[in-house]
Amino acid sequence: MTDVEVSVTIPAAGVVLEADVVVPGSAHAVVLFVHGSGSSRRSPRNRHVARELQRAGLATVLADLLTPEEDRVDAATGRMRFDIALLSERVSALIDRLPADELTRGLDIGLFGASTGAAAALVAAGARPETVKAVVSRGGRPDLAGDALRLVHQPVLLIVGERDPIVIELNREAMDKVVGETRLEIVPGASHLFEEPGALETVAEMARDWFLRHLAGAPAG
C-alpha cells in the first residue's frame, strides 16, 4: 500500500467534522489528535508531532472538534471549546468511526491530546476501554477530566514543560486518579507551548516511543 494523505469529512455525534488523514504505506496503528481550545487540526505543533509519528509508521488523524459554523459562533464565548463533555463525546464518535473506515480498519488506536484537548481525550479513552490502547498528553489539563480519570485503564504519558509549574502540579494530581500505567515526563527548559529550540522535537520523540511501545503491531521503539 502506498502512502495516503487526504482531507475528509466525518459524521460524528450529529455533526460533520473536518479531518486530515495520513496513512503511511506500512501503517500498523493510528493516532487521533485532540487539539486544545482555540486551536484546530492545522495546529503547527500537532502537525510537527504528527510528521514524526508518520515517519515511524503510524497513521494520523487530525480532526476539528467543532464545525466551521460552531467555531465562528463560539469564538466570542468559548463555551463549546471548553465543554469537555461535548468534545469527548465527539472524540468518542470519531474513535468509533476509525475501525469502520477503509484507511484505518484493523489498526490499533492511540490518542494524542493537547492542552484542554487532553481532558477530552482521557474522558473518551475511559469511555472506550476496548478500543483506545494508549494516550499521550502534551501540556495537557487532565484535571479537567475530573472523576472520569478513574475509568482510564490505558497507559498514559503526560508531557509537560519544566517552565509550566502549575500544569506540572495538575498533572501530578491527575496521575493519582488514572488506573492504568502513567508516566510524567518534564521537558527541561520548556514552557507551556514548547516553543524553545528542540522542545517540540523532544515531545514528538517521547510520543512516538510511547505509541510504538503500546500499540499492537508497532515495531519495538
Image (tube, helix red, strand yellow):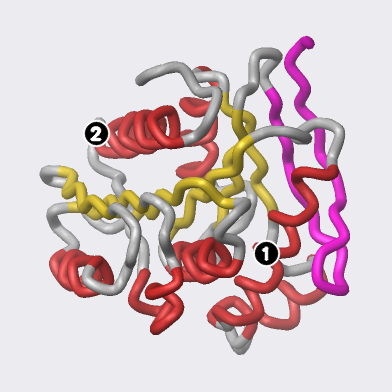
Residue at left offset 25%, top offset 31%:
198
Residue 34 vertical placement versus 178 (above, below)? above
Q: Is residue 54 left or right of residue 15?
A: left
Tell me the residue that label 2 is attached to: 197
Residue at left offset 50%, top offset 23%:
218
Disc 1, SS: helix
Query: Identity of the amino acid at label 1?
Result: Ser
How many numbered markers are drawn?
Answer: 2
Residue at left offset 85%, top offset 54%:
10
Tags 2 and 1 touching, CB below 8 Å: no
Where residue 165 sits: x, y (%)? Answer: 13, 66
Where residue 34 sits: x, y (%)? Answer: 56, 57
Residue 192 vertical placement versus 70 (above, below)? above
Where residue 76 sits: x, y (%)? Answer: 63, 85
Say which of 192 and 22 sits in front: 22
Q: In this view, does 90 lie to the left or right of 136?
A: right
Q: Distance between the residues labelled 2 and 1?
A: 34 Å
Q: Mark 1 packing: few (<14 Cα in 10 Å), some, or many (20+)?
A: many
Tell me the residue that label 1 is attached to: 92
Region in magenta: 1-23
Asked whether residue 142 is in view, the answer is yes
Residue 147 appears in which quarter of the rendering? Answer: bottom left
Residue 192 appears in which quarter of the rendering? Answer: bottom left
Which of pointers 2 and 1 lies earlier in the amino acid sequence?
1
Q: Is residue 125 magenta?
A: no
Say which of 29 and 140 sits in front: 29
